[in-house]
Image: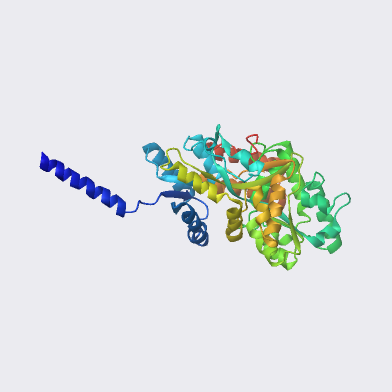
Amino acid sequence: MRNLKLIVGIAVGLLLSLSIITPALPEKIIWASTQLVPAHERAFVIGELLPPFKEETGIEVEFVGLLYPELADRLEAEQLAHKVTIGVIGELHGGLDLFASKEFLEDLAKLPELPERTFIPTLEKFSYLYGIKAYVPWMQATYVMVVNKKAFEYLPDGLTSDDVIKGTYKWTYTALLEWAKKLKEATGTPQLGFPAAPKGLWHRFLHGYLYPAFTGAQVKNFNSPEAVEMWSYLRELWEYVHPASTTWASMAEPLLRGEVLLAWDHTARIKDAIVQRPEDFVVVPVPVGPKGRGFILVVVGLAIPKGAPNIDASWKLIEYLTRPEVQTLVLEKVGFFPTVEEAAGKVPAGALRILAEGVTAQTGAPYALVAMIPSLGPLSGEFTALYREAFERIVLKGEDIQSVIADIGPRIMKLFEEAGAPLPPPDAGS
């Protein structure tokens, strides 16, 4: 017995000595994200974004870039197995909405308040899903209008440059039509441009801008009297749209070449024009329609899965990623816009500030009808193709409006039924 006690004592002593000379393993969390996955963006995350966080907190972050279906499959598998390895999720609103509906996410309302940052109210509102605070708004992007300042010389009566820049009630689609007419009359050429080529994002304007602005919904009012009015308007407007629009996939080059003075496109696709000639352009909110100012908001959120292994470390990472100075760095490096108001003062003067101010103006402008891109998985391509089909048949080929929308409307609704997906905002009454 005495020998046994001696052996045990020696073993305990060895373990204690090892604990003194062997450093504790650093905390580690997995950040699974569908965003910042392309090679150059991933390099930024690993090489610039995360090292200061590890230096400050001692927490090591493994960044795992995943495709949308991959993240959904992994998260569901971990939840069902009750073996969660993911600490933080970076995902679009649509995906987080789906995860929250399945009760896969922690309620972040129970965690400490994030200090010294004010999230843009529109974004904060969307982060509450199914009775919980499902995510923290992390990044945003959108589609805006760009105005060459020369175009302000041809404004229609009753509309000022201030109305356009601030997005007042006078900046309407009727005013856009009148402005486009006046520009064509003055210059002899249509001066309004859209990225309507097959690889352009024209379909986003149709389902996320015009439809909400004229009908109050992206989908459920596709075949409605208000939709007939919308398509009639677009037919008239198209007479003043540059004919090369159907060949343009993005609007930066046409703006820089002076082929158009007004254009609409994704912020990432007009960025080069602003960067190269910031003194010539201003980014402004889109016009208001009969039902409001419809616009797409691409919102990326940060969430914590239920059962995450280290919620405290996960929350520290979310706190870090939403700091104003970190959000500004993300804007500078990869072009996603901040979600906190305090970041605006940290954006350097020049092209980035012009873009940031335009995006913030649109997000905060009155009469907002925010549209989220629907999450339909493999059926997403069919969804956008149907809006393009309607445009081609009605505007380019001159088919009867009512006949076309009566044909296409049920086909769009069927996609949502097949995907088991809810109708996207503002259809859902947001």
Question: Which residue lies at the image location 50% right of the left edge and 57% below the top edge?
Answer: 52
The N terminus - image quarter = top left
Residue ranking furthest to the top: 131
Can residue 266 be seen?
no
Is residue 208 or residue 299 the one in the foreground?
299
Screen quadrant of the C terminus = top right
- Residue 361 is situated, as x and y percent measured from the top left of the image, at 72, 49
Please tell me in which quadrant of the rendered image residue 333 appears. bottom right
Which residue is pictured at 19% across the width and 44% down the height?
Answer: 9
Is 42 drawn above or below residue 381 in the view shown?
Answer: below
Q: Is residue 144 left or right of residue 308?
A: right
Where residue 428 sits in the image (x, y, percent)? 62, 35
Q: Is residue 409 above or below residue 184?
A: above
Residue 364 position by quadrant: top right
Instruction: Indicate the position of residue 318 as horizontal and vertical percent values.
Output: 52, 47
Q: Nearer the viewer, residue 5 or 177?
A: 5
Q: Residue 381 or 1: which is nearer the viewer? A: 1
For the point 50% across and 48% down, the residue is 317
Give the number of marks: 0
Q: Is residue 356 visible?
A: yes
Task: Report the coloring of the rendering.
Answer: rainbow
In percent of width and height, residue 351 lies at 69, 62
Nearer the observer, 63 or 377:
63
Write the residue at 83% across / 58% down: 152
